[in-house]
Image (cartoon, rainbow, N blue to C red):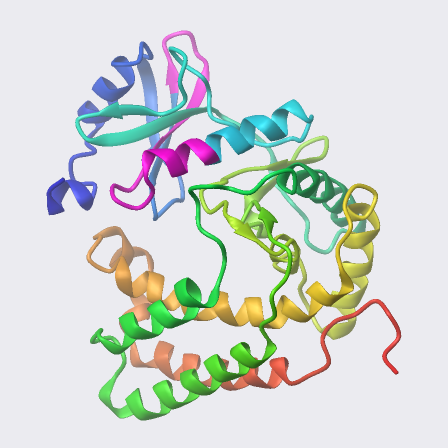
Amino acid sequence: MTDTAFNFDALTPDFMWYALESIGVRAESGLLPLNSYENRVYQFTDEERRRYVVKFYRPQRWTHAQIQEEHDFAHELLEHEVPVSAPLIINGQSIHEYQGYLFTLFASEGGRQFEVDNLEQIEWVGRFLGRIHKVGASKPFEHRPTIGLDEYLYQPRTLLQNSSFIPAHLENAFFSDLDMLINQIEAHWQPTKTIRLHGDCHPGNILWRDGPMFVDLDDARNGPAVQDLWMLLNGDRQDKLMQLDVLLEGYQEFSDLPNSQLKLIEPLRGLRMVHYMAWLAKRWHDPAFPLAFPWFNDAKYWEGQVLGFKEQIAALNEKPLSLQPQW
């Protein structure tokens, strides 16, 4: 795979039309790009006016076996009546290849935005997350990774150290505070039971129709169950406690969440913070990234990250969220 292909330059409308035609699907109109940076995702209508979404996977990110596990997990959830967007089976398979690109097809799922401050919706999401995790706990992923410090902290720190993004006048403060954050996360990290997760269950990956519809399992992996819960909490501490109480009221109808996992919320938030900036640095050669994230190469962004490290260190040293009395 050449660098040009890796940057998705080959994905012209003609290329995508022929890729779809190779599996017997004829795009009549559309190929409208949807928000996706790691992969490339387009909505279109076929000659019978059916609406689809086609997803072209970023080369060299996931292996065929890892993508297949994602697809199998989605179909397993559907079998258990969990509302999740699952890839379509065409010609007996869900993964297709065209001139070096792996791609898959989905039915186009409509819906409105999940309301993060709507407690009734939060409880509903909690029930379905409990069902997702009940299925996820039945066996682990064999090929997809497990959330841990190496992938989310140590590798990103090395990548950032070897990059040229951090302004020279901020380097000492940035890496000093980053190392303090890493030390704090290490101190609060604890072994716990891991299960198959959605992996990136933020509000943008939940559509709302007659209830929640979970989309985008691209980051599915093994990890602690609380990983799929903490990104749904927002606001101040009291807001988060109220949301967590409602979320778990629904969740625990189907799955149990050990109270000890709540101590991982702030460590997981710290992991995501470090992993996110390293992800942007790693993908910067992709022309879509400078266009979508122009602030990433600005000194003000990195000044904000130094402040963010300090705030996250403070959050790690506060009492963790808990629904049990603190004595």
Corner quadrant of residue 36? top left
Q: Is 129 drawn above or below residue 310 in the view shown?
A: above
Residue at 64%, 67% in the rendered image: 265
Measured from the top left, where is residue 257 in percent x and y? Answer: 75, 55
Measured from the top left, where is residue 287 in percent x and y? Answer: 21, 53
Q: Is residue 138 magenta?
A: no
Left or right: 303 as drawn, with respect to 221: left
Q: Is 146 drawn above or below residue 71 in the view shown?
A: below
Measured from the top left, where is residue 282 in percent x and y? Answer: 27, 61
Left or right: 174 as drawn, with respect to 126: left
Q: Is 78 drawn above or below residue 70 in the view shown?
A: above
Closest to the observer, 74 or 5: 74
Q: Is residue 66 magenta?
A: yes
Left or right: 257 as drawn, with respect to 149: right
Asked whether residue 131 appears in the rendered view, the answer is yes
Q: Is 77 drawn above or below residue 5 in the view shown?
A: above
Quadrant in which the C terminus is drawn = bottom right
Closest to the observer, 139 or 297: 139
Magenta residues, as a range?
45-69
Quadrant in which the N terminus is drawn = top left
Residue at 30%, 13% in the rendered image: 23
Residue at 65%, 53% in the rendered image: 225
